[in-house]
Amino acid sequence: MITVLCGGVGGVKLVDGLAAVLADPSTLTVIVNTADDWEYLGLSISPDVDTVLYTLAGLAGDERGWGIDGDTWTALEMLKRYRLPTWFRLGDRDLATHLARTQWLREGRRPTEVTAALASALGVVPRVLPMTDARVATFVSTPAGRLPFQEYFVRRGARDPVTGVEFEGIEHARPSPEVLDAIRSSAVIIIAPSNPVVSIGPILALQGMRDALSASAALRMAVTPLIGGTAVKGPTVEMLRGLGMRADSAAVAARYGRFIDVFVLDIRDRALRDTVAAAGPPAQPPAVECADTLMTDPAGRRRLARALIDIAARHGIEVAATTA
Ligand code: FO1
């Protein structure tokens, strides 16, 4: 079994590539950040979970990276007439997902069960698990104040300098039993090229998660979210700098520390190999491998997925893939 830890738009491309090349996509488990979740117009919204579900169901809005491709905005137009806030854009079909999630949560189902029900209805084969069933909410400190994540990211366009990030509720949040089981029983665990602060950060900060990762016998790999010191999409660089960290692959490798065995650097940054290895814990420096991590099209997603499967094989773990 392969388990991927990921956020939304960036990391999901790798998940999509893996689902396409694995001989048996049901052996793929995706543990998804839920610290971006929030309640909007009374609805429970889980943006990263939905991005993963829509992508794996072949419904994703590719050019935006979120929502459903070809969705319509009739409900949003009515909300505008009612003078309700519409800066967080809910498409008509996407709205149905939020209604279903909200209803099922109100009936007392756990977020893990609700996600499984959505996945099954959408025909998603890999297992998609919210990182926890508890409520965790990201707040971003900026000169304009302490902002709920979606206010910072969507409403204000991630333009405010970030001086701090907090995950409200994290001290009481544990990974779900399903997440712990996936970590325990995986042969390979991959940290996707998602934002290390606000996407992977909350997953690693869950109570007991670091112990579970340390105890796992899996080959643990992380894929850099940075190429040549810049992120393909999103405010990763600005966030790392705002939090007083260097914005390069070595800083990301240092952040993942002893939870990884292999750090996958982009091929264009191969000169940084030694710096990245030296950034890991001295007693347990990660092996550094290089791959083309730029996923500009479905072929690029599959290419990186195959490269990771090859890297796993070089480290003694065979994963069955389809022939190219
Ligand atoms: N992102 C935007 O940039 N603008 C939007 O209007 C927007 C609406 C939206 C609705 C539902 C949903 O599940 C996600 C949505 N996103 C939107 C994406 C999103 O909030 C962020 O990409 C993630 O939280 C960051 O991973």
Image: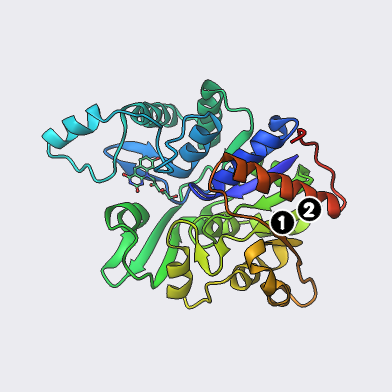
Quarter of the picture containing the C terminus is top right
Colour option used:
rainbow
The residue type indicated by label 1 comes to Met
Residue in the image at 40% along x and 26% along y: 100
- Label 1 sits on residue: 221
The CB of the residue at mark 2 lies under 8 Å from ligand 1: no
Q: How far apart are marks 1 and 2 (CA)?
A: 9 Å
Residue in the image at 29% along x and 40% along y: 89
Residue 317 image point, x, y percent: 84, 48
Q: Can residue 306 be seen in this view?
A: yes
The residue type indicated by label 2 comes to Ile
Residue 51 image point, x, y percent: 47, 39
Front residue of 223/322: it is: 322
Front residue of 100/174: it is: 100
Quick check: marks 1 and 2 in contact, CB under 8 Å?
yes
Q: Categorize mark 1 by other alpha carbons within 10 Å: few (<14), some (14-19), many (20+).
A: many
Q: In which quarter of the image is ligand 1?
A: top left
Residue in the image at 79% along x and 49% along y: 310
Label 1: state its secondary structure: strand
Say above or below: 181 vs 210: above
- Label 2 sits on residue: 311
Q: Is residue 216 visible?
A: no
Tell me if 115 is positioned left or right of 208 in this view.
left
Eye-nearest disc, 1 or 2: 2
Q: What label sits on residue 324 in the rendered view?
A: none
Q: Which of marks 1 and 2 is nearer the N terminus?
A: 1
Instruction: Check the image and name the residue furthest to the right.
Output: 316
Quarter of the picture containing the N terminus is top right
